[in-house]
Image (cartoon, helix red, strand yellow):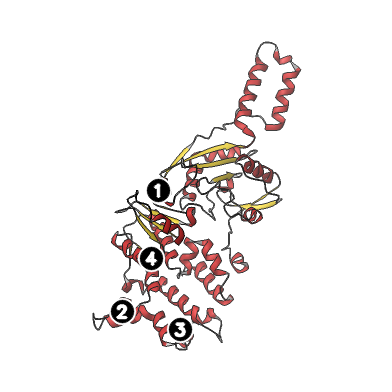
């Protein structure tokens, strides 16, 4: 990952945590019912998730009590606007933006000397069956402060009132109680520590629950797409819910998404886009063996690209260039069928969210499409970073350079 780190493309916006903040973070973990970290320093993202703590605990979702009960931690106002690097739901970042938009000033005040634990509550204690995921509707976002600071504030105000009553101002016992409270918790008299619950309405979304599932319910008919074949086989036994159920590898899924006006594909337009150029070059890179030139140079130089394209067998060559071959033949005759000339996964990778979709829906469908056919390295980085990082580890060093160049220059 060193090349990505140098290029500021690997978790570059994490917030460093050390000293007193570690103590507060651990108090949050205890408050939420998790075990503390033994690390003296680490980093966190917008929702309070830490890659170092996750590695220590050997649990990437260590801020969850099962799939149905995710949590967050705010220990710094710097978390405002930061990425959520391992979102459990596709809407996690939007929820955190909602939190900071509503309670931003109070968060600045509270995190001076305290920290905030967040519960994302869907009124679901535990999932029992795959289609329980359809219960997601309205998320209640509630807050708890470490050390029960709200209760300590009430106690402090009661002490102040007691101090002011009668001749109690000369009572040294009350003096000491006030001093002890102030030394531990600070002067809480004029602090606004009240964070009222928030609500976030859920439409279509992706969740890591059940090994990954998409719920598309803002269209003609609800569609549920599972990434796990085992979970999919369990889900299709359901006879109660009126939804369409697919596994992500089913070709029929793409047809259904087109029928429901969720995705579209205009090959004549796509062939002239940077997307197609990246996908075509990605395909060639998968078949180059014993290269005499760096992969980056082969993909960037037209002459070298053609040279290596002509070195591979004719079947593979047609697979890489199938789209252009099909469009070329189509100009001469309508007798040619797309499926005879264009490899299926290549065709799927050239689909786009339908132009009528909102920005929110487009991002979700981009993520679904890149999971169906992960051939566009830039979109893979944008919409599924964890899968990108896994794939990146398997790539040739020179190919990594080419990918980084695409991402940094957005080409």
> Label 2 crowding class (10 Å Cα cut-off): few <14, some 14-19, many 20+?
some
Seen from this angle, which residue lies furthest top?
166
Residue tagged 2: 327
Whichever of callouts 1 and 4 sits on the residue coming sooner in the sequence is: 1
Horizontal arrangement in the rendering, residue 350 relative to residue 393 (left or right): left
Foreground: disc 4 or disc 2: 4
The answer to the question of whether label 1 and label 2 lie on touching residues, with beta carbons closer than 8 A, is no
Residue tagged 4: 250
Could you tell me if residue 405 is visible in this image? yes
Foreground: disc 1 or disc 2: 1
Foreground: disc 3 or disc 2: 2
Residue tagged 1: 134
The answer to the question of whether label 1 and label 4 lie on touching residues, with beta carbons closer than 8 A, is no
The image shows residue 93 at horizontal and vertical percentages of 49, 50
Q: CA distance from mark 1 to mark 3?
A: 50 Å
> Label 3 crowding class (10 Å Cα cut-off): few <14, some 14-19, many 20+?
few
341 to 376, vertically: above or below:
below
The quarter of the displayed image where residue 200 is located: top left
* Label of residue 302 in the image: 3
Q: Nearer the viewer, residue 141 or 331?
A: 141
45 to 164, vertically: above or below:
below
Could you tell me if residue 228 is visible in this image? no
Whichever of callouts 1 and 3 sits on the residue coming sooner in the sequence is: 1
């Amino acid at each position: 990952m060193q090349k990505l780190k140098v290029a500021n493309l690997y978790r570059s916006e994490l917030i460093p945590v050390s000293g007193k903040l570690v103590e507060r973070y651990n108090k949050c973990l205890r408050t939420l019912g998790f075990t503390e970290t033994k690390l003296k320093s680490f980093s966190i993202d917008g929702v309070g998730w830490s890659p170092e703590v996750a590695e220590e605990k050997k649990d990437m979702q260590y801020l969850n009590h099962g799939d149905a009960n995710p949590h967050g931690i705010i220990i710094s106002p710097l978390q405002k606007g930061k990425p959520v690097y391992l979102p459990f739901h596709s809407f996690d970042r939007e929820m955190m933006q909602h939190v900071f938009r509503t309670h931003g000033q109070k968060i600045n005040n509270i995190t001076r000397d305290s920290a905030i634990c967040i519960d994302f509550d869907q009124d679901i204690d535990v999932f029992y069956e795959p289609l329980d995921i359809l219960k997601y509707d309205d998320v209640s976002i509630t807050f708890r402060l470490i050390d029960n600071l709200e209760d300590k504030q009430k106690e402090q105000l009661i002490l102040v009132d007691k101090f002011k009553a009668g001749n109690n101002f000369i009572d040294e016992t009350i003096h000491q109680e006030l001093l002890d409270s102030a030394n531990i918790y600070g002067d809480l008299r004029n602090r606004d520590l009240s964070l009222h619950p928030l609500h976030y309405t859920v439409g279509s979304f992706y969740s890591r629950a059940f090994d990954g599932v998409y719920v598309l319910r803002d269209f003609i008919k609800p569609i549920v797409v599972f990434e796990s074949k085992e979970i999919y086989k369990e889900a299709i036994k359901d006879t109660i819910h009126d939804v369409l159920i697919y596994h992500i590898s089913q070709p029929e899924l793409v047809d259904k998404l087109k029928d429901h006006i969720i995705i579209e594909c205009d090959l004549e337009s796509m062939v002239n886009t940077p997307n197609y150029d990246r996908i075509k070059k990605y395909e060639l890179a998968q078949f180059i063996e014993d290269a005499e030139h760096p992969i980056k140079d082969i993909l960037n130089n037209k002459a070298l690209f053609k040279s290596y394209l002509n070195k591979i067998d004719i079947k593979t060559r047609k697979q890489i260039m199938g789209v252009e071959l099909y469009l070329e033949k189509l100009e001469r005759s309508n007798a040619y069928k797309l499926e005879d000339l264009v490899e299926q996964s290549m065709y799927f990778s050239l689909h786009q969210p339908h132009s009528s979709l909102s920005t929110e829906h487009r991002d979700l469908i981009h993520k679904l499409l890149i999971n169906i056919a992960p051939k566009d390295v830039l979109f893979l980085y944008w919409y599924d970073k964890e899968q990108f990082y896994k794939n990146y580890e398997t790539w040739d060093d020179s190919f990594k350079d080419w990918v980084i160049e695409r991402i940094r220059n957005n080409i």
